[in-house]
Amino acid sequence: MSRDHRKLDAFNLADEMTVRVYLATREFPAAETYGLRSQVRRAAVSVPTNIVEGCARESRRDYARFLEVAFSSTREVIYLVDLAGRLEIVDKKKAADLTLFCGRVAAALASLIKVNRPRHPGTPSSP
């Protein structure tokens, strides 16, 4: 049961987030080429690629696990973009706008995880 990642709002938002991260990190100083710039870009790319890989998995459990990894990477991007803003490596307004957009990605993934997390019979739902 392969899923089409292109039909998911979460994927499309994650893809847009990755483009935005790459554009924002162009301005990073050369000293950050292998530091913060590299880390935030890897984390950003991890989000849509984990969604794609999860969509290719047969089991709901595997699918949900890859969505959880994508969510975790989104949270990493949020932290790193915020850090770059506080360190004034990127304009604070740009960092704030990007962080807000990343929050939309995280929310979309959280919703997708919630509806796709496998339930075990007899186990009460989480509050």
Image (cartoon, rainbow, N blue to C red):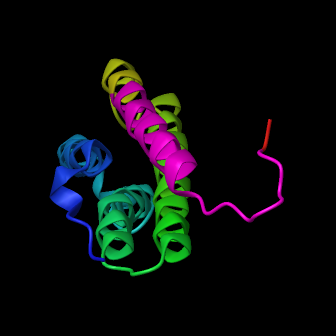
Where is residue 20, by image quadrant? top left
Query: Does residue 80 appear in this view?
Result: no
Q: Which residue is located at x 30 percent, y 60 percent?
A: 48
> Residue 73 placed where, x, y %?
49, 57
Query: Does residue 65 appear in this view?
Result: yes
85 and 76: which is toward the camera:
76
Residue furthest to the front in view is 122
> Residue 37 placed where, x, y %?
36, 56
Q: Is residue 84 above or below residue 67?
A: above
Q: Is residue 47 above or below residue 62?
A: above
Q: Is residue 100 above or below residue 111?
A: above
Horizontal relation, residue 47 to residue 72: left or right: left
The magenta span reads 98-125
Dominant secondary structure, magenta: helix
Where is residue 55, by image quadrant? bottom left
Q: How many marks?
A: 0
> Residue 68 placed where, x, y %?
55, 60
Where is residue 97, by image quadrant? top left
> Residue 33 placed where, x, y %?
32, 63
69 and 3: which is toward the camera:
3
